[in-house]
Image: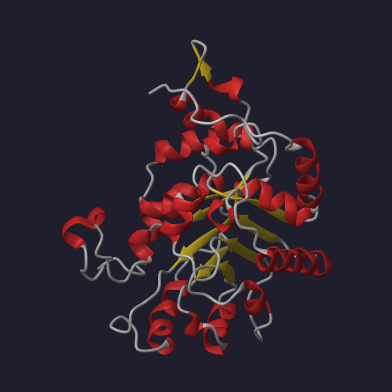
């Protein structure tokens, strides 16, 4: 499908300056990128409209297929959220890794097929909506359908993220029940990758949860999310650093539902709602990584402030 852009190109974005700052940090093993990358709202910032013309018109199809290579001209890393919704085929992985320069690193969200305990009551789950997930924390399924396909690209993969949505009381009465299932799952994971866990139950954040992750060398994901403590608060929690690397995902302002952020910020052309707390927390993570000489992987979502590249620019300024 081909179409004209729905907006003019934004002005006054210094892509080369941002690239230089990000490259300097990447040389210190501090990798900063965005959550996903196929946003036409970034044309004029990260992307050049002329690269995606077909017969003189902007081609959405060409943009979707080719923009990752241009993304990599600015950012050293990207988080692929798409993998949360599927087990991509081997051919898909081949195309994806071939579509960007070898220097670009990736993080991927692990498919929800192994991280959802009970399928949400949402139309996309069809007859499974509201039903228990028989594949929850199935390490063998994960290895056969996901990890084995990624092994040829493991040098380019920074971290794999297990995102657990908020568990209802009917799933777990407390943290102990969750950890009883999480521990053997983490124990079974192959050692070729780094892993990180992101939870959405703030009551789980505590010594037992952090100890479980530390036992397996798995990182806690510092996350800005509607029903989670601010990242600045998470940073102050005892024993919160559970691995020899750090992962952060700045996703949403506390208290703001995802759908509200989409409605307010699309098509993500500019910052609409600055979040000083999240910015300062990410600066703190960067400083800590420098001091300790530990790898750090930081991802910013458009839904945090309205435009992830501008948010990253502001953090580094």
**Picture residue at 20% right of the left edge, 62% below the top:** 128
Residue 122 rendering spot, x and y as whole percentages: 26, 60
* Residue 260 left/right relative to 271: left
> Quarter of the image holding residue 30?
bottom right
Can residue 148 be seen at all in this image of the molecule? no
Q: Which of 157 and 192 is in front in this view?
A: 157
Residue 290 rendering spot, x and y as whole percentages: 81, 64
Looking at the rendered image, the quarter that the N terminus falls into is top left
Against 220, is 85 above or below?
A: above
Residue 35 rendering spot, x and y as whole percentages: 55, 51
Residue sitting at the far left: 127
**Picture residue at 48% right of the left edge, 30% below the top:** 6
Against 291, is 59 above or below?
A: above
Against 35, is 52 above or below?
A: above
Can residue 311 be seen at all in this image of the molecule? yes
* Residue 23 left/right relative to 39: right
State how the image is colored. Answer: secondary structure
> Quarter of the image holding residue 218?
bottom right
> Quarter of the image holding residue 254?
bottom right
**Picture residue at 74% right of the left edge, 53% below the top:** 314
**Picture residue at 61% right of the left edge, 57% below the top:** 273
User: How many labels were placed on the picture?
Assistant: 0
């Amino acid at each position: 499908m081909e179409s004209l852009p729905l907006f003019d190109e934004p002005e006054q974005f210094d892509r080369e300056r941002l690239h230089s700052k990000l490259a300097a940090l990447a040389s210190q093993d501090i990798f900063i990128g965005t959550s996903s990358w196929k946003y036409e709202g970034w044309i004029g910032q990260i992307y050049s409209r002329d690269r995606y013309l077909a017969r003189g018109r902007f081609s959405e199809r060409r943009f979707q297929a080719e923009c990752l290579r241009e993304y990599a001209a600015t950012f050293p890393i990207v988080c692929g959220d798409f993998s949360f919704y599927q087990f991509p085929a081997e051919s898909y992985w081949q195309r994806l890794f071939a579509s960007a320069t070898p220097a670009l690193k990736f993080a991927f969200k692990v498919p929800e097929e192994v991280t959802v305990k009970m399928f949400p009551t949402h139309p996309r789950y069809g007859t499974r909506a509201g039903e228990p997930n028989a594949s929850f924390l199935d390490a063998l399924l994960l290895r056969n359908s996901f990890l084995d396909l990624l092994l040829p690209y493991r040098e380019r993969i920074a971290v794999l993220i297990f995102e657990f949505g908020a568990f209802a009381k009917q799933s777990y009465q407390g943290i102990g029940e969750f950890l009883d299932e999480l521990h053997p799952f983490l124990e079974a994971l192959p050692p070729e990758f780094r892993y990180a866990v992101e939870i959405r139950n703030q009551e789980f954040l505590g010594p037992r949860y952090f100890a479980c992750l530390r036992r397996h060398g798995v990182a806690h994901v510092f996350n800005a999310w509607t029903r989670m403590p601010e990242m600045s608060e998470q940073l102050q929690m005892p024993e919160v650093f559970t691995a020899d690397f750090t992962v952060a995902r700045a996703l949403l302002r506390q208290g703001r539902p995802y759908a509200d952020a989409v409605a307010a910020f699309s098509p993500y052309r500019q910052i609409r709602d600055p979040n000083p707390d999240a910015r300062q927390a990410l600066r703190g993570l960067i400083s800590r990584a420098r001091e300790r000489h530990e790898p750090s992987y930081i991802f910013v979502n458009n839904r945090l402030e309205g435009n992830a590249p501008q948010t990253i620019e502001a953090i580094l300024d």
